[in-house]
Image (cartoon, rainbow, N blue to C red):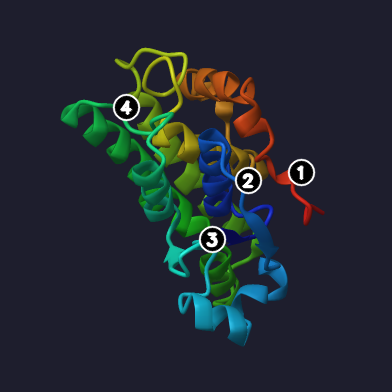
């Protein structure tokens, strides 16, 4: 397998964690997002969206979108599971994961922030807007976990929810969010940090880290 990513991409970070949890190896190919590497013609031929990650499988298929990739890994290598056994529980994990991947993360995507700058917004407003989106979204995620047992987001083992949470908390720190208001999320992050699969996927551990 070949994983196309960028060390700071939270979406690629999710997939790195999933691969590590499943005990799988993937060759990493790096595309520098701030230098426009994701818009290079050869990469657009692979992934027309010009986004990372993309996963080239051993069969030659090209998979895009981090959650689709994680669920593909789950179907092929079901142990350890990223989704719980019960239908209700799986739906809850997916809902939490999608709240981050679809509602919080995209609006601080480099492409979105660059468009705001092109429209003449001062940098402080661009950053402040992204911070507000992250803070508001994570506070909703905090409420979603109030009735869930720990130490991870949904119980005694990490799930797809934790794969989404940890990178998003990394983004939250970069934008200066107030994490003191998120004790349940922070506790889940601490549990994740103790696992090598999460620690080895961190951006500063990647070969292209700056």
Q: Position of residue 54 (x, y in %)?
A: 51, 64
Vertical arrangement, residue 116 with respect to residue 102, above or below: below
Q: Are marks 2 and 1 in contact (CB under 8 Å)?
A: no
Q: Residue furthest front?
A: 59
Mark 4 residue crowding within 10 angstroms, few (<14) / some (14–19) / many (20+)? some
Find numbered disc 4 in the image and state the secondary structure of the residue it sits on: helix
Q: Name the residue carrying label 1.
A: 204
Q: Position of residue 189 (x, y in %)?
A: 56, 25
Mark 3 vs mark 4, CA separation in Å: 27 Å
Q: Are marks 2 and 4 in contact (CB under 8 Å)?
A: no
Where does the C terminus fall, quadrant-wise? bottom right
Q: Using the image, tell me which numbered label, if any, was put on residue 144.
A: 4
Mark 2 residue crowding within 10 angstroms, few (<14) / some (14–19) / many (20+)? some
Mark 4 vs mark 1, CA separation in Å: 30 Å
Find numbered disc 2 in the image and state the secondary structure of the residue it sits on: loop
Vertical arrangement, residue 23 with respect to residue 203, above or below: above
**Observer-nearest residue: 180 or 99?**
99
């Amino acid at each position: 397998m070949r994983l196309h990513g960028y060390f700071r991409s939270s979406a690629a970070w999710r997939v790195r964690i999933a691969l590590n949890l499943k005990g799988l190896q993937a060759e990493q190919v790096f595309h520098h997002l701030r230098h426009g590497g994701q818009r290079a013609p050869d990469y657009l031929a692979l992934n027309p969206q010009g986004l990372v990650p993309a996963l080239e499988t051993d069969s030659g298929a090209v998979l895009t979108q981090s959650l689709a990739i994680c669920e593909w890994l789950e179907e092929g290598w079901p142990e350890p599971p990223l989704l719980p056994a019960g239908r209700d529980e799986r739906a809850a994990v997916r809902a939490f994961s999608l709240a981050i991947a679809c509602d919080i993360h995209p609006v601080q995507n480099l492409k979105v922030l660059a468009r705001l700058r092109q429209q003449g917004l001062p940098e402080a407003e661009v950053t402040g807007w992204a911070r507000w989106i992250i803070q508001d979204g994570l506070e909703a995620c905090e409420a979603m976990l109030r009735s869930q047992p720990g130490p991870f987001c949904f119980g005694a083992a990490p799930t797809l929810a934790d794969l989404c949470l940890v990178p998003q908390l990394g983004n939250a720190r970069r934008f200066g969010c107030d994490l003191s208001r998120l004790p349940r999320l922070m506790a889940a992050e601490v549990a994740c940090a103790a696992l090598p699969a999460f620690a080895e996927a961190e951006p500063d551990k990647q070969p292209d880290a700056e």
